Image (tube, helix red, strand yellow):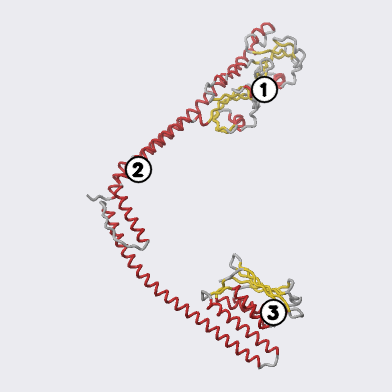
Amino acid sequence: MNRTIRKTLILLTSFTVLLPILVMTLSVFIAIQQGINKTVLERNEILAKSIALSIEQQIKDASTLLNSMSSISDYTLLEKSLIQSGIYESVFIIDKSGTVLTVLPEGDVFSGFDFSHQTYIMKLLKDNTQNPVYSPVFISTRTKNPTIVVAVRHPSGILAGYLNLSWLSRLPTTLSSEKLTDLSIADRYGTVVANRNRSLVEEQVTIASTELFSWARKQKSGTLLHQYNNYSLVTSLSYIPGPDWYVFISELESFAFRATRDVLNIALVASLISFILATLFGYYMGRNILVSLTILTDEALQVQGRVYRTIEHRSSYIEINRLIEAFNTMSQEVRTREHQFEEANRELQQTLEQKDTLLREVHHRVKNNMQIISSLLTLQADELACEEDQELFENSKLRIQSMAMVHEKIYQSAGVESLALKEYIQDLVELILSNHHTYFEYSVAGDDVIISLNQAIPCALAVFEACINAIKYGKRSDGSGRIDISITKFSNNLLTITIKDNGSGFPKDFNADHTHSMGFSLMKGLMDQLKGTFSWYTSQGAVIEFSFPLQ
């Protein structure tokens, strides 16, 4: 029974559960993740706030007790109420000038000490307030625990109680038996007041320069994700007014959000299982389609290798059978067109060969005609008595020979529309020197450049004129000299040819624009024809330089 691919795909889509499961899993994961993260953050913030409130209440109760004793002058009663109760380590009774009168329970050990320079004493004396004033945290010499001074007014002047904070040192160790949640308390200056690591407290380590403390001073509450000692931490904050303390509840990020990762892993496993089941089911349903498509692919590769066959396979799907029929028709059309193309290509190749032969014959005949003209000029020059006229004829003959050499090089080369410039210039210089019977040395260096026929003849004539100028004016008294030619092709397709001799150079008053020299006029005109530039200067001899863009 034939079925359409469309109906099969609808059936596959109906039975495929991957997309619904993925959408559902993603939605549930996002919801659970947000809920878990919110719960973790709220839990730590509530814990930090609870601890802060507890500590604040403890300090407030101790301050209230000390304040209530401010009117009592009986030192024995003060000692029983404040010291023996364990609330304070010691109490300093200070007069209004800031001098210690006595200390409970030590007695007169510190009598006469001047505390007026202490900030909290100065504040209490200056502001004339009835509220308690708190000192910064410091380590008690008695208990080796952190402590603060709570100062209130007293009939004698000031009561300054050293608060017993031994309970504060035990608080971090009782927070979590797993040691995964860390409680830290820092004072207004960032000095660690309480931490599981006692050495941080005893050494009064400061976190004032950390990102966490800067954030805490600004926000006073909330949660921050930050880096500390190469660990990624989630820290919740609560602020204790009065002593200006900061309570930090910190957890490793990986531990705090481990439930989110567990949910993600479950979602990934469920998605993977769904994907495997959907893939197996889709493969089973589409097996017949894949068989037919494989046959079509193999036959398409055969067509690419110029093997044309008719596919006899028939599928149970109508659309694939139509595709096979269309492929068979296309294969036959390609075979027919390929035969037509091969025939046309053979005809074109024959035409190109005929054209190549014809062009070579044309170049050969042009070269022969120029050789005839050169020979005629030689015969005519022999009849001239004037050496100057003979020289003009000789130079004209060489110009014609230089153009003939271009055509000779072209019909001898593989192509018929270009030639190798460096090789041609070498032959041209040898031709010129052999006809002038001079003792010149020469060198041709630089890039191997291929130049088109349209540019070859103007370039050849320009180089010819420059070499003639070097031989004529650059030779020494003994008739010797040297010509150096360099060929440079730049990245912007600009070609520069430099001809230099080792003679005396150009005269100081020489100006090519005002000279009647035929050679310079030719060189300027030829460079204009090539849309290039022509320059000359003296540098240890005469230098002529041509620059023009290659086609």
**Within the image, what quadrant is residue 204 found in?**
top right
Q: Residues within 10 Å of mark 3 (few under 14, many from 20)?
A: some
Is 508 placed above or below 245 here?
A: below
The amino acid type of the residue labelled 1 equals: Pro
- Give how far across and how far down residue 403 sits, in percent: 59, 81
Indicate which disc residue 48 carries.
none
Identify which amino acid the numbered label 2 is placed on: Thr
Q: Tag 1's secondary structure?
A: loop
Which residue is nearer to you in this view: 151 or 462?
Answer: 462
Q: Would you name the residue on which mark 2 appears?
A: 279
Return the residue at label 3. 469
Q: Earlier in the sequence, mark 1 or mark 3?
A: 1
Question: What residue sits right under mark 1 in the picture?
Answer: 136
Mark 1 or mark 3, which is nearer to you? 3
Side (left or right) of 253 relative to 467 = left
Q: Position of residue 113 (x, y in %)?
A: 76, 15
User: Given the image, on which type of amino acid does mark 3 rest?
Assistant: Asn
Instruction: Classify 451 as above or below 54.
Output: below
Report which quarter residue 64 is drawn in. Answer: top right
SS class, disc 2: helix
Q: Position of residue 57 (x, y in %)?
A: 58, 17
SS class of the residue under badge 3?
Answer: helix
Residue at image x 58%, y 67%?
493
Q: Residues within 10 Å of mark 1 (few under 14, many from 20)?
A: some
Of the residues under marks 2 and 3, which one precedes in the sequence? 2
Which of pointers 2 and 1 indicates the residue nearer the eye?
2
Label whose residue precedes the other's in the sequence (2 or 1): 1
Distance of mark 1 from mark 3, alpha carbons? 99 Å
